[in-house]
Amino acid sequence: MCLAVPGRVAEVYERDGTRMARVDFGGVLKEVCLEYLPEIAVGDYAIVHVGFALQRLDEESALATLRLFEEIGALEEEFGDAWARAQAEAQPEEAS
C-alpha cells in the first residue's frame, strides 16, 4: 500500500532549482518536493505522497491521522522498521 502520510517540515532548501524539504514522519526523515506548496514553511505539516507535498495540514489533523494510521498498522507497512524504531525512541520511559 502506498499512503499519503502527514509529516512535519523540518528543513526547506533548494536543489537544482527545485524547492525541497526534509520532512519528519515521527522520527523518519524523508526528502520531499515542495513545488506544489510554495508557501509551506519549516514547522508546517503537509500530506506527502510519493515524495511530493500535496496539501498543507493543521497540526491537530496531522497528529490524529498519524495516530489512526498507527492503530491500523499502516505506518509500519509504509515505513517498516525505521518507523518502529522512531516510535520506540520517542516513548518516555516509565518511572519506577
Image (cartoon, rainbow, N blue to C red):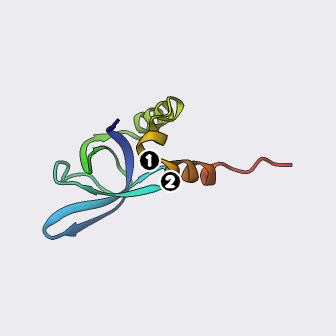
Residue 40 in percent (x, y) is at 26, 52
Badge 2 marks a residue whose secondary structure is: helix
Mark-to-mark CA distance, 2 and 1: 6 Å
Q: Residue at x 16, y 54 (%)?
A: 35
Task: Give the class, few, some or many, for how many residues have Cα within 10 Å of label 1's Cα (few <14, many ≥20).
Answer: few
Please name the residue that numbered disc 1 is placed on: 79
What's the amino acid at mark 2? Ala
Q: Nearer the viewer, residue 50 or 5?
A: 50
Q: Residue at x 22, y 54 (%)?
A: 34
32 above or below 66?
A: below
Task: Give the class, few, some or many, for how many residues have Cα within 10 Å of label 2's Cα (few <14, many ≥20).
Answer: some
Residue 20 - label: none
What's the amino acid at mark 1? Phe
Q: Residue furthest right?
A: 96
Image quarter of residue 58: top left
Apparent side of residue 92 relative to residue 32 in the rendered image (left or right): right
Please name the residue that numbered disc 2 is placed on: 82
67 above or below 54?
A: above
User: In the rendered view of the protein, which quadrant contains the N terminus?
Assistant: top left
Q: Residue furthest bottom?
A: 16
